[in-house]
Image (spheres, rainbow, N blue to C red):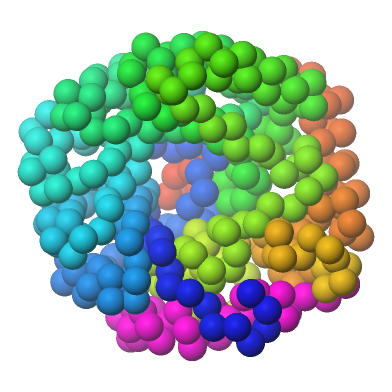
Amino acid sequence: MGLNATPGPPLWLLAELTYRCPLHCVFCFNPVDFARQEEELTTEDWMRVLRQGRELGAVQLGLSGGEPLVRDDLEEIVVEAHRLGYYTNLLTSGVGLTAARAAALKAAGLDHVQLSFQDSTKEMNDFLSHTKTFELKSRVAKIIKDNGWPMVLNVVIHRMNIDHIDRIIEMAADMGAEYLELANTQYYSWAFLNRDQLLPTHEQLKQAERKTDAWRARMGERMRIFFVAPDYHEGKAKKCVNGWGNMFLTVAPDGTALPCHTAKMLPGLSFPNVREHDLRHIWFDSEGFNRYRGTGWMKEPCSSCEFKEQDLGGCRCQAYLLANDPAVADPACYKSPHHHLVEEAVERAGSLSPARAMEHPLVFRDPANSRRLAGA
Ligand code: FES
């Protein structure tokens, strides 16, 4: 989409119902200052957002967080979403998905569940999330299957679990997952704070890809395996959130409407709140959604790049985090004048022994750390 083209509808509405979460994952994509958030939207607010989303043309609804199951109106929200005709996805850590709640969500019309695991081993799963949740998650996987939902297992991949990839895939196959998403860590938010400890080496990555390909050949149609390639190692920028203001509309727990999970941190931009504006205005007319839409905002090297329509300049949040300017080319791209920052980070990861990497203590996602980092 060029400068003046009218955007299509937001096909995906992501409802981040809450930042409350029983887990403390070191790679959490919630904003580092999440503890500063304002009051959560009410049930009625969410009902209104859902209706406005459908009127705009949204068809997919992601119910995420934090942990969406901590909201006791989740079932009510699903009933309304189902009635409106959304295809509903619950993105959960599994904590709180008891057999009774699963039955209620099934009756409410929930279509799909994505369950996150941190690793195939209890030790690493529980260490990375700072909770004892591995066995609970295994029980939840069975509950999901018993309810006949298609199951996506999502595992965020990084230096500390990438060598377990065989066991992770085997675990997903044993649990009867239809889909396995091996999502290489994106280095924003908490993962950015922990990047030196989490970034895998080139060699680890290549090996993981080889093993994944072998499993794909073995599993065929029984389980589809997605290996979400890491942009740090590829020298290429990715079309982040499928393009700014192009497909995804995220509503944060306090009602701030965002083109991606972390856009609120970007300087010089204001994002509207669903308490004050309807989604039509937000999507088509707000400054925040229009600023990096299409290609008209680009500077060199993006503006004359032959790939600009494919990657749309990459990720604005990464450009800000690494180059301190959200309007420059994503430093993951080899053409970016800041690409050396990505190369140096990968090199550093390659030269750090696991023991050295662990000398920097990990920062776990929790409200106390969040308040400290926000300076509150
Ligand atoms: Fe915000 Fe990529 S995460 S644009």
**Visible in this render: residue 190?**
yes
Is 25 rendered above or below residue 255?
above
| Relative to 58, 227 lies left or right | right
Relative depth, front residue between 38 and 17: 17
Q: Give the image location of residue 223, x and y in percent.
A: 43, 23
**Visible in this render: residue 73?**
no
Quarter for ligand 1?
bottom right
Relative depth, front residue between 37 and 117: 117
Q: Residue at x 41, y 86 (%)?
A: 281
Q: Give the image location of residue 349, x and y in percent.
A: 79, 30
Q: Which residues are magenta?
A: 273-300
Report if residue 284 lies within the magenta region: yes
Relative depth, front residue between 371 and 66: 66
| Relative to 142, 59 lies left or right | right
Q: Quadrant of residue 11?
A: bottom left
Main secondary-structure element of the magenta-colored stretch: loop
| Relative to 285, 85 lies left or right | left
Q: Give the image location of residue 48, x and y in percent.
A: 22, 75
Q: Quadrant of residue 266?
A: bottom right
Q: Residue at x 68, y 39 (%)?
A: 230
| Relative to 144, 72 lies left or right | left
Q: Give the image location of residue 192, x and y in percent.
A: 65, 46
Report if residue 69 lies within the magenta region: no
Q: Residue at x 66, y 32 (%)?
A: 198
The quarter of the image holding the N terminus is bottom right
